[in-house]
Image (cartoon, grey):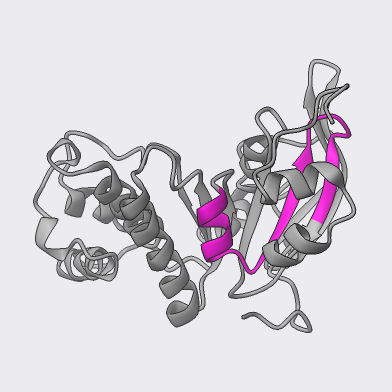
Amino acid sequence: MPLTDQIPIIQVADFTAGYDGTVLLQDLWFDIYPGEVFVILGGSGSGKSTLLKHMIGLYQPLRGSILIDGADIVTAEGPGRLDILTKIGVMYQQGALFGSMTLLENVRLPLEEYTDLPDEAIERIALMKLQLVGLGSAACKLPDEISGGMRKRAAIARAMALDPRVLFLDEPSAGLDPITSAELDQLIVSLARHLKITFVVVSHELPSIEAIADRVIMVDKQTKSIIAEGKPRELREHSDHPWVRQFFNREAPRNEGTA
């Protein structure tokens, strides 16, 4: 469990996002600490994936700052922005592996692009990353030759290629059966604890959230803001917000006139 007296590895402040005059999220403030598994959750259309895309620098907010290891990804340019980007890794929902490349070649790619290491070192590091996620024996397979869960593990291995301080995962359990999802949850927790990697995970899968999250924030489509922050168990048992309690207790909202 990370210690919150540490300096945050990520600081989101005065954050507002939207497009074409439409505000999707507004006035968000939160910190994420080193080694934490931090989950962003919310209902469909609440903006949780939009928030993640801003945090990795794909979109520019309407207002606010996103500091990663003390540097603002919103305003950074040139070498400064590249320095930030090499401190983070991203696993997209479908894995986004290159289908014509083997798993090993996929993991090699960031090392070939962003380092001057000799080929032998790149090969060794890439294989080591695959071994960390349990795919050392599948290094020569193509993405279409492995299961969906294995593809997501390979995507995590590629995201770890440059030894980032933070890994962003977008809906890692989506489309997986319960057993495969549980195995992926165990991998995330193991990497966080043993390698001290900070994870920022977007999810709405309640079993996974409860299995991996040190802390969560919940964003809400109606208020366009954070309506809850804390540990999943505390929110389930003690939140004073009815929608938060319904989410964590898997309760359907009551219709008017229902006893």
Compared with 60, 200 (above or below) is below
Compared with 111, 252 (above or below) is above
Query: Split into 4 quadrants, where in the image is the C terminus?
Result: top right
**Residue 94 showing in the rendered view:** yes
Compared with 81, 47 (above or below) is above
Q: Does residue 93 appear left or right of residue 62 in this picture?
A: left
Residue 213 pos. (x, y %): 60, 64
What residue appears at the point 52 percent right and 64 percent down from the top-left corner?
Answer: 211
Residue 35 found in image quarter: bottom right
Q: Is residue 204 magenta?
A: no
Compared with 150, 221 (above or below) is above
Residue 6 pos. (x, y %): 74, 82
Query: Split into 4 quadrants, where in the image is the N terminus?
Result: bottom right
Residue 98 pos. (x, y %): 26, 37
What residue appears at the point 73 percent right and 58 percent down from the top-left corner?
Answer: 236
Given residues 130 and 44, the one toward you in this image is 44
Residue 105 pos. (x, y %): 19, 50
Q: Does residue 205 appear left or right of residue 136 in this picture?
A: right
Residue 96 found in image quarter: top left
Q: Is residue 208 magenta?
A: yes
Residue interval drawn in magenta? 206-228
Given residues 114 and 129, the one toward you in this image is 129
What residue appears at the point 60 percent right and 58 percent down from the top-left corner?
Answer: 84
Q: Does residue 66 appear left or right of residue 130 in this picture?
A: right
Report the label total.
0
Q: Residue furthest front?
A: 259
Given residues 184 and 170, the one toward you in this image is 184
